[in-house]
Image: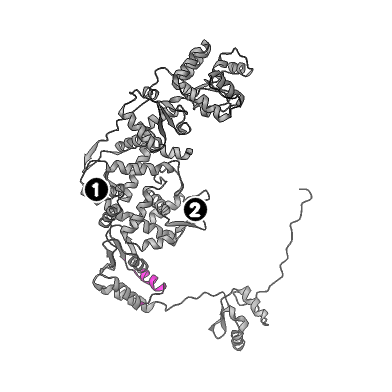
Amino acid sequence: METAQILQHASLLTLPQLQVAEILSLRAEGTRRRDLARALGVEPGDPRLEAALHALRERGLAWPDGEWIRTVELHKVLANSYGFGRAAAHEMTYLPLEQLQRVAHELGVLGGPSGRDHAQLVRAIGAALADPDFVREQFRLAPKAAQDILRDLAAGEPFYADPHALLALRTNRRGTPLRFAVDRGLLIFNGYYGAALSMPSEVGAALRPGFRADFDTTPPAPASVAISPEAVDRSGAAAAGAALASVVTLLEECGRTPVPILKAGGIGLREVRKLARLIDSDEEGVRFWLTVAGMNGLIGIAADRVAPSAEFDAWLKLDPAERFAWLLEGWLRMPAAPLLLDGRPALVGSEHDESSAVLRVTLAAVLTSLPPGRGAAGLDGLAAMLAYLRPLVAGDADEVVPLAAALWRECELIGVGAHYAPTSLGHALASGDGERMAGVLRDFLPAAEETVLLQSDLTAIATGTPSASLSALLDLAAERESRGGGSTWRFTEASVRRAFDAGAGAGELIARIRAAAAGGRVPQPLEYLVADLGRRHGNVRVRTVGCVLRSDDTALLGEIMRVRSLARLELAELAPTVLSSALGPAETLAALRQAGYVPAAENADGTIAFERPARHRARGTDPES
């Protein structure tokens, strides 16, 4: 098993399972069951130990082999447990073959020809040192001075760096106290730690007097309080509706004005705060929804700017429940912790990203394990459970509190938790039952509204989530004033004019509004507003002009308009003596001259603008400089 896979499996261990794995990691070549039990302070047949070993076996991390427990290379993942050094297999990795042969010979495990390969020797030595009784026998044979050094290292730091003793060792003097320990693998020098010897974990664990490891098999019991499930679900449903509206608003805003990305990556604080003001949210919400949208493929990068992806348009066409199910699917297991506000730009990862998915799933399981009608009394209890259930990625209870707070806030924002209790959506999500999830989402987020209530004060009210087509119409012809469980728009002269500018006619716009109105009723003030603006729209028109041509010879201007080679100028008559050109002055002059005419440029005061040849000169060199 690769190291990354070992770490992935180990990250799912509970505290007692990890404690067993830590003891097993001290001996790379295996641990006898009785030695494991002694280190944990239990009997070899203790059912709690059996349960932990069964969990390790199910994850492929350890398995029985007679009286021994064999493991994958746990020592690569769980190094320095309980203050011991690295396993002998690690410490001997770069030892020369000759030195390994000497150690194997002194330990009496060489066997076979003296030319055994490096890996075989490392395994043979590791297997010998895995027997605590064998290690203690070697210790008893050591000189008194070597015993003192070994005893101190086993009880404290596993490194020895006395320069005089190391110098004597390097000069290969056989009588030095360290020579006995080095020749038997009780201490290893390989340069990895600089000028120092290290004690392998197998040796330290065997020689540390009275060594006992922690074995905490009783999970914490977080205090709980009574909470109404109906109140929890009301809060969850409101959060889900607000969440859906926030994502739509945020991405539509990014679609109108793509958000620039910092050179170092991510979206800066200034842009995050600007988006928060525009969508009536806070920095926390913008960070969270940008990340969720990104993890669900709803945003992408275009020319160093963040904008909605093509998937966003398809997502908008779904019913509210289907849209939210899309978001939930990506959120639960997303490798990101966007609400750990530690100064990072939005959409930039943190050191907790990989572990956040494991802890998020675990937190959902903790919530749903609470008794019906009960919620946790506070965040500390949830953090303690995370530290117990996933200690390798959570750390201890104090370390996990900020991460637990960030993950709990995510649960609140997305509607799976409220009042430190799970909502019906949280229960459905943890169950993995798709049909149950769909049912809860339909309750939380009813079908999209296809009609809107129009009022005489020129407001339009959608009591639920508006459909994509309804939102598109109202966002075009009215100003949105609120979002969430219900949305409100207000028709104004500017908003109706915006619809006309987009190509709608007065009759067409009223027809579309009437089709979207509840009962087909359009208040008279709105009809008057649309009709009045429709009559006045376009009375004054603005055209883009690159330049104008002026001449008192109207016949000449008429001739120029008919010249086919000048068609690209898109000439139009503004007055009998004035033509407009779509191109700028320089391009228009060049085209007229190429067609055989002799035009001249004109200043703003009507005088001819003379074109003098440019004369370029280089700055002279100061001979004294």
Based on the picture, tell me whether residue 508 belongs to the magenta stretch. Answer: no
Residue 202 location, x and y as percent?
47, 23
The quarter of the picture where residue 242 lies is bottom left
Which sits in the foreground, 215 or 283? 215
Q: Is residue 577 above or below residue 299?
A: below
The quarter of the picture where residue 551 lies is bottom right
User: What amino acid type should be assigned to the residue bearing mark 1?
Assistant: Val
User: What amino acid type should be assigned to the residue bearing mark 2?
Assistant: Ile
Q: For the residues carrying marks 1 and 2, which lies nearer the camera in this image?
A: 1
For numbered disc 1, what is the local secondary structure? helix
- Number of numbered labels in the structure image: 2
User: Which residue: 37% across, 41% down?
Assistant: 359
For numbered disc 2, what is the local secondary structure? loop
The residue carrying mark 2 is 261
User: Which residue: 21% across, 49% down?
Assistant: 230
Which sits in the foreground, 91 or 469? 91
The residue carrying mark 1 is 232
- Residue 217 visible to an observer of this rendering: yes
Q: Badge 1, how many Cα within 10 Å: few under 14, some, many 20+?
A: many
Which sits in the foreground, 393 or 252? 393
Q: What are the residue bounds of the magenta stretch?
A: 490-506
- Residue 216 visible to an observer of this rendering: no
Residue 437 location, x and y as percent?
29, 53
